[in-house]
Image (tube, rainbow, N blue to C red):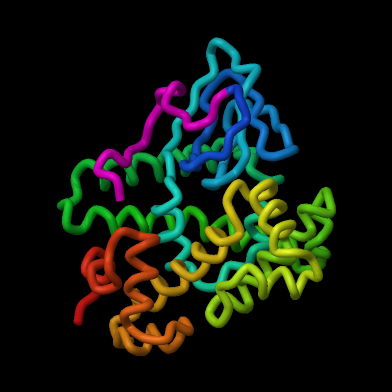
Amino acid sequence: MRDDFHVDTDISALPACEHEAYLEEGFCGMCTGGTAVIKVFSVSRTIAENDLVTVLPLQLVSIHDVSADFSMTFFKVDRGVFLDVMSGLGKITPDFFFYMRKNFRVRLNGQEAARFLGFCRVLDFRCKNDDSVFRRETVLHLLRIYFWDFYVHFRKISCDRKTLRILNSNKESIAFRFAMLVFEHHREHREIAFYADKLCISPLYLTKVIQEVNGQSAREFIADYVVVAIKSLLLDANLDIKDVVRQTGFSNHSSLSRFFRQHTGMSPSEYRRTVHIAW
């Protein structure tokens, strides 16, 4: 986790601008004054006081029509931190991420707004005052609480809803079905051709669609799911590395370590030490 992770009120530090771009950093914040329009993919929402905004990393985002008095209390979440958060939340299905694209704004009442600002104060205090050895995992736990509340709400309202109603186009439908297949098969299959065959389209077209809809390549999308699966298993101190290798479908310890280091910059053992697993 970055040493400069903190709660901010400087609007110029928001990762979004007036030009649409796929964000490496997402952000979570509440408007404290003024108005702005935030667009995530094809959905635009006017943001006003007490609106809570949660934009995930790797989404296509822009912000415009920003009033002179627009203000926000927010924190940024980069891709690496977000994957670490997800690894501790169990099996969150891809429909949640598609849902969040269109439901990134939530209107809070006064009590809920005060609660969010209280959460930000706790998060900021922990970032500034916790021993650096423990800061990272403390912040991850707080962020897991934040995102878990969204997921619980999503599950409650989606019980009787057909998931594909949240999709606007055939390409989004392909991307969603691809995501669900990756969720189901990523431990055994990491080849684009496998998923393209399941979807009855060419690997080239699948790659093009996923890049367009998700802002990352199909290969990166698959890798992200595998990384989350590995990290989730590494959190369990009772599992040996050989158990992690077996449960994630790698042929041996070396191949898993090579893959994990390529995508995270550290070995599985080094990652375990950063989350302070007690052996």
Residue at 59%, 26% (x, y): give it.
49
169 inside magenta stretch? no
When the figure is inspected, residue 170 is found, relative to residue 125, above or below; the finding is below
The spot of residue 60 in percent (x, y) is 62, 39
- Image point (62%, 21%), residue name: 35
Which of the 4 quarters of the picture holds residue 3?
top left
Comparing 165 with 219, the one in front is 219
120 relative position to 68: left or right: left
Q: Position of residue 142 (x, y in %)?
A: 38, 55
x, y (%) of residue 169?
Answer: 83, 50
Q: Which residues are magenta?
A: 1-17
Q: Is residue 198 left or right of residue 68?
A: right
Q: Of residues 110 and 247, which is closer to you in this image?
A: 247
Position in image of residue 279 (x %, y %)? 19, 82
Q: Is residue 6 in the magenta section?
A: yes
How many callouts does the rendering have? Answer: 0
Query: Is residue 76 toward the left or the right of residue 21 in the image?
Result: left
Q: Is residue 2 left or right of residue 86?
A: left
Q: Is residue 127 above or below residue 50?
A: below
